[in-house]
Image (cartoon, rainbow, N blue to C red):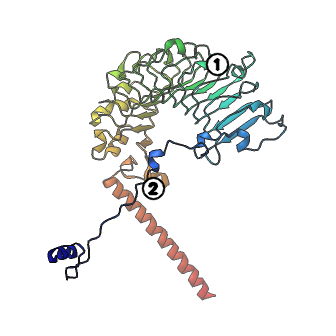
Amino acid sequence: MASEDQAASANNGDDGSNVPPKKQAILAPLPLEWTQMNQCEDNDNNNPLDIIRYPWDVMELPSPPDPSETALTIVGTAGQKITRMGSLASKVSPNLTHLVLRSHLIRTMEGIGDLKKLELLELYDNMIDELRELNGNDGDGLPGVGLRVLDMSYNVIRDMGPVQFCPNLKELYIAQNKLKRISGLKHLKHLRKIDLGANRIRVMEAEELSGLENLEELWLGKNKIERIEGLGKLTKLRRLDVQSNRLTKIENLTSQVDTLEELYLAHNGIDVEGASCETGLALPFTQLNTIDLSRNRLTNSTPFAHLKSLTDLWISGNEIKTFEEVEPLTALTELDGVYLEYNPVASEFEYRKKLAEMIPSLTQIDANMIGGLGQHGYVSAGGGGVGGSGGNLVERMRQLQDAVIQKAAEETQGAEKYANNLVDT
């Protein structure tokens, strides 16, 4: 019995010593709410998508509608968000020409079939998956026929074919959607600008692009395009953007030799050979003033030496190592700004100074303007005026210091003269 009592006493910590009894941790129950994040009770309205909210629930609209009102703009970046477009025609002016419902939670494109005078429709940044009602409800083709600007960027649209019902469009924006191919464009001869960036397009289809005889701007950045093509009939194209794709060559730009002004091809896989194709940069472009070939595979600047109209050249993040590989740019007498940062040559001693001496027309190197103190009335040493390092910078600082000292001396003399005048009086 004694041994049993001693064992019990030991288990209870009562062994005659001051050792406290052992405490057993009690764990709190695990929270399970995170396992039910996608589950909603029938009476739970916490999910914004489950709430039905029309434009007139977010903004007070005149009743009856004011015929003089021609524009309705509701931006959902602050406050309540629209989830349904509803029967807009009964709530807005029959003369409405501009409708902007930006940054809401709209899933279905509806209620526009009876807006017969609509010229601009912007449903940017919603959750729309399909282009609907552009052909109208009465078979009259409205509002599509009357639209001049259509902006459906930042949605989840997979088929752009219904834009064919908008033959008078001048600007079309369907960037950041889920398009895999270009469609519905072949008869839109009035288009001036198209933005289909940030989609999944692989081919610049000639059949779709050939009818765009008045197109001036084509933006196709951030897609999966492997080749520039289909531009043969685009004889008025001024800006072309195919950056962040899968290009290895610059080609098929013959029809743009007298019109192209800006070419953006950054973040591709273009090397010197690919940039020198006969139907690409080798052509004698007469208006080309801006080229962006940053983050490619260039090892020298020879593809640009003959482009006399160039004023801005962005070739940062390539593989240009020496000033000899930059030498071809000295033939460009109109070159105003050049980006060469993140090339090995940018690590060379007095890189900016040497570059400015090689190309006297430059006013900007990378993100920095040339001139420094010279722009404030101080003559820079060496005649180059380049904001760099070394003796040139030391001389400038000396000039500035001398100017400050002289100014302080003049102020001191003025103060002494003023004090003397007070004493005399």
Q: Which residue: 50% across, 76% down?
A: 412
Where residue 17 appears, x then y in whole percent? Answer: 20, 82
| Residue 233 seen in the figure | no
Name the residue beneath numbered marker 2: 378
Q: Residue 401 at what x, y percent from top left?
A: 41, 65
Q: Position of residue 284 (x, y in %)?
A: 44, 19
Give the Cα distance between marks 2 and 1. 53 Å
- Within 10 Å of the Cα at label 2, are there few (<14), some (14-19), or many (20+) other Cα atoms? some
* Circle 1 residue: 190
Residue occupying image coordinates x 51% and y 76%: 413
The label on residue 370 is: none
Looking at the image, residue 12 sits to the left or right of residue 26; the answer is: left
Q: Is residue 78 left or right of residue 403?
A: right
Residue type for callout 1: His
Residue nearest the viewer, comparing 361 with 57 = 57
Number of numbered labels in the structure image:
2
Q: Furthest residue to the top?
A: 207
Dividing the picture into quadrants, the one containing residue 225 is top left
Residue at 64 percent of width and 88 percent of height: 425
- Image quadrant holding the N terminus, namely bottom left
